[in-house]
Image: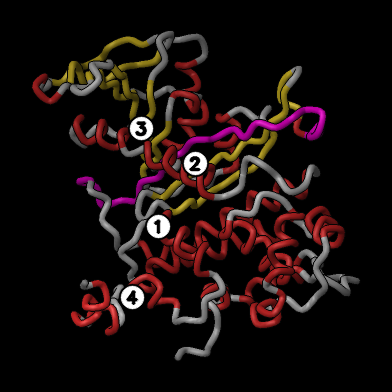
Amino acid sequence: MYEGKSVFAQLLEVIAWRRFQTCVDRHRGDWKIKSLRCHEFLRIMAFAQITGRQSLSETVLCLKAVSHHLYHIGIRSKISKSNLAHANNHRSWKIFFDFAHILIKEATLLYKNDSLELDIDSCVYALDSTTVDLCLSLFPWAHFRRTKAAVKMHTMINLQGKIPEFILVSTGKLHDVNAMDFITWEAGCWYVMDRGYLDFERLYLLHQSQSWFVTRSKKNTKYKRVYSRPVDKSQGILCDQKVRLTGQGADKAYPELIRRIKYIDGETGKRLVFLTNNMLVPATTITKLYKNRWHVELFFKWIKQHLHVKTFFGRGNNAVRSQLWIAVCIYLLIAILKKRLGLPQSLNEILQILSVTAFEKTPISSVFFEKITLPDSMCNPNQLLLFEL
């Protein structure tokens, strides 16, 4: 019989705790702290995310019910709702921000050889944002509209492995195009975004960095056609043009030619107009690139459905940001575990299995690969004689 560590304790071993402590020391997270240090707080919040706890009081209640396991998963401090709430409001969110980027680098290396299912050798990133609605009376610091508060997660996903490589958490007032100012564009990479990011001055900076972009045009975008390529309408391509922008200020913001592709979706019948600075790849490749932008939407859907980023354990700015960044860390942790163990399950299936086996003492790999076998007594045909008349 296995008498080693619990599944949750083995999961926590995936975390490079020395590197996490470096993040803690950088932001003086444990300075003058005598109880519930940062590493313990992360373990508790990881437990809350993985097992689906809805509040701090529920988290404390469940941890007390398994108090005999706490020492073995690295939690030595006394746990109460008050000290957990204090830690939630005062342990700097920047600690979890820094550690998330450490996990991002590790996950990116693990997934760098995954296929893109596209005829492109370069890295492809999908950029979008999601809004988390909040109650204005409870979160006045996140004022968004007259009667509404919100925070935004501006996210850029690497389509190899669907790993988020850039995340900016802001109040709801920050427009999507402003998030582009915080991104360092990589030469030779593709950036796919919707028309909410259509700002020609910023797109020209991306173009000057020798990167490629694909975005959608707006109805009021003015242009002058310079050249039209022959197209295969059986592929849904209606036109493939080189154009010069003529809108107010657009010609100065983006002085070079830009490629305009009009496409009709065979499934929905919807007409879409794409803009890109790449003049060489086939038009069908541009349409496939934009279609793959949907993976960033799937990332938002996964985070919102399976982790807790819509209801918060605290009301302060620090508490909200900490919870969001810890949720990202858990997503990355599961992605790393999947790759290291070669698990066939999806990230959602892995999370669900972990949530019900957290304190089972069994090798973590056997949780995902173990076959169900019946006891010998149940396979004994003589057992049926008990029910014969």
Q: Quadrant of the C terminus?
A: bottom left
Which residue is at the front of the view, 97 or 214?
97
Q: Nearer the viewer, mark 3 or mark 2?
A: 2
Q: Position of residue 244 (x, y in %)?
A: 35, 16
Instruction: Name the residue carrying label 3.
Output: 214
Q: Residue at x 36, y 57 (%)?
A: 346
Q: Residue at x 44, y 77 (%)?
A: 364
First-in-chain label (4 vs 1) = 1
Q: Nearer the viewer, mark 4 or mark 1?
A: 4
Instruction: Name the residue carrying label 1.
Output: 349
Whether residue 241 can be seen here = no
Q: Quadrant of the N terminus?
A: bottom left
Instruction: Name the residue carrying label 4.
Output: 370
Q: Is residue 43 left or right of residue 369?
A: right
Q: Residues within 10 Å of mark 2 (few under 14, many from 20)?
A: some
First-in-chain label (2 vs 4) = 2
Q: Which mark is residue 300?
A: 2
Are the two marked residues, 3 and 2, in contact with CB atoms closer than 8 angstroms?
A: no
**Figure check: 87 above or below 157:** below
**329 inside magenta stretch:** no
First-in-chain label (3 vs 1) = 3
Q: CA distance from mark 2 to mark 4?
A: 31 Å
Q: Magenta stretch: give its range.
A: 118-141
Q: Nearer the viewer, mark 3 or mark 1?
A: 1
Which kind of residue does numbered mark 3 sit on?
Val
Q: CA distance from mark 4 to mark 3?
A: 45 Å
Element at badge 1? helix
